[in-house]
Image: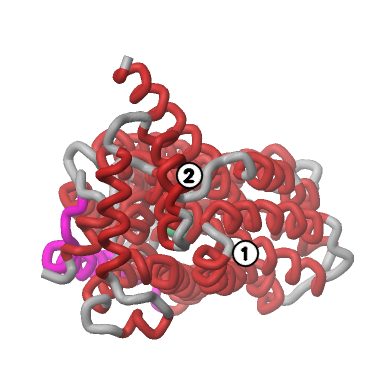
Amino acid sequence: MAQDEAGAATRYVAMVAGIAAVGGALFGYDTGVISGAILYIARDFPMDAGEQGLVVSAVTLGALVGAVGAGALADRLGRRLTNVAAGLIFVFASLVSALAIGMETLVAGRFLVGCGIGLTSVAAPMYIAEAAPARLRGTLVSVFQLAVTIGILVAYLVDEALAAAGSWRWMLGVAALPGALLAVGMLPLPESPRWLAKVGRDAEARAVLGQLRGDGHVEDELGEIKQDLARERSGSWARLLDADVRPALLVGIGLAVFQQITGINAVIYYAPQIFQSAGFESDVVALAATIGIGVVNVLATLIAIWLVDRAGRRPLLIAGVLGMVAALAVLGIAFRDTSQGAEGGLGSITVLCLGAYIVSFAFSLGPIVWLMISEIYPYTVRAPAIAVSTAANWAANFLVSLTFPILRIRIGSSATFLIYATLGVLTLLFILTRVPETKGKTLEEIGRSWHS
Ligand code: BGC
């Protein structure tokens, strides 16, 4: 009987995580879709390179703003309503983008889409981490990343399917549907028990924990949460600078930035161009290879879902970053001489290395960064600290996606890949020396571990 009850609770918490993760699918879709859409937008709204850059990067800037805003909203409105707000923004912003009458409305629409992504990239992993039992937290937060990768893959496929018709308005507009699903789906879900306890709504926190755990351990968990709240000094943005918060913040911001500066979005956003410079001249082949990257990205995320609560965070991070560094180093060396083209072996080396790089990212930095950002912080500063780390991730993303095309022209693909490889070595050192193992610990245990 107790087992049935626990099984039902596990299914319920998985469903809760699945609905919150729809925001991840929108994050992936809306960041992935623009690479294909921009070609056709440029036909309707003639624009120079600078304006193109603006249309593409508006989302990243919006995400930065949305992430900072999410820090305040998630504490004030609660985690659930912040996710609902993200869904509503996605609906509105997708429609504004799809119906844009000119460059200004389009950039505004894309900026708003970015705000939705910023909100969801803070609020969804936080909500899932606070709802999940410790033993499943890694798996359930990794579902968010799985949704991101599915969103990217669907964007590649939609771009491909609508390319012949050049229907960029549909490419941007269809995201309104999952946006509505997110807003409506989140409404009946319970609020995070940890947020309820934080604002003093203990009876509701107890009831929600009962729903999510379905066993007799609710009082223990609630007791632990309350003890922590009593111990922690009240949180505010200024508290982020306190000596006992700083080590955690360093880990969160460090992971967030390293996830980006090791080049993931140079590949995700520019894969067709990379394949073309490896000698696959036809658009069709380059696009097919890109879709292959999207599929591998989804599948390899399943490795993390399976292993993150078994093997732990650190072994996956270490193995993954090692794989990324090796793949980038080989690419860097192979691209020294591009004169032989695809037939000369560069094509297959590129396919193999990009594949190995994506697999290695997908089971390590991809999911585990979002997971650890949402689990390492002590209670009272959790929302602002997650917001700051996530904003740092978007700032670094902006920098890399803006500079990759410039670097390729100025210093060449080979040197660019070698820079990412070197930054990968720094990432590895950072993980080895700074990042703690959080597998199986409750959020309260992790929060307290920084004090010792
Ligand atoms: C990163 C994104 C990236 C995606 C690729 C996410 O974890 O934050 O920047 O595009 O993974 O799958």
Tell me the kind of residue under disc 2: Thr
Q: Is residue 189 magenta?
A: no
In the rendered image, residue 402, in percent from the top left (x then y), is placed at: 52, 73
Tell me the kind of residue under disc 1: Gly
Return the residue nearer the eye: 326 or 229: 229
Residue lying at 32% horizontally and 84% vertically, measured from the top left: 241
Q: Which residue is mark 1?
A: 114
* Vertical relation: 440 (above or below) 227: above
Q: Could one spot residue 397 in this view of the protein?
A: no
Q: Which residue is mark 2?
A: 149
Question: What span is colored magenta in the figure?
Answer: 411-438
Q: Which quadrant holds the C terminus?
A: bottom left
Return the residue nearer the eye: 249 or 404: 249
Q: Quadrant holding ligand 1?
A: bottom left
* Vertical relation: 260 (above or below) 271: below
Instruction: Answer with the quarter of the image where residue 331 lies.
Output: bottom left
Residue lying at 72% horizontally and 42% vertically, measured from the top left: 177
Return the residue nearer the eye: 226 or 179: 226
The mark lying in front, picked from 1 and 2, is: 1
Q: Which quadrant holds the N terminus?
A: top left
Sort mark 2 into few (<14), some (14-19) or many (20+) by Cα contacts within 10 Å.
many
In the rendered image, residue 366, in percent from the top left (x then y), is placed at: 37, 52
In the rendered image, residue 233, in percent from the top left (x then y), is placed at: 31, 76
Instruction: Answer with the quarter of the image where residue 252 lies.
Output: bottom left
Give residue 204's mark: none
Does the residue tagged 2 have its C-beta within 8 Å of any atom of ligand 1? yes
Q: Secondary structure at mark 1?
A: helix
Residue positioned most to the front: 203
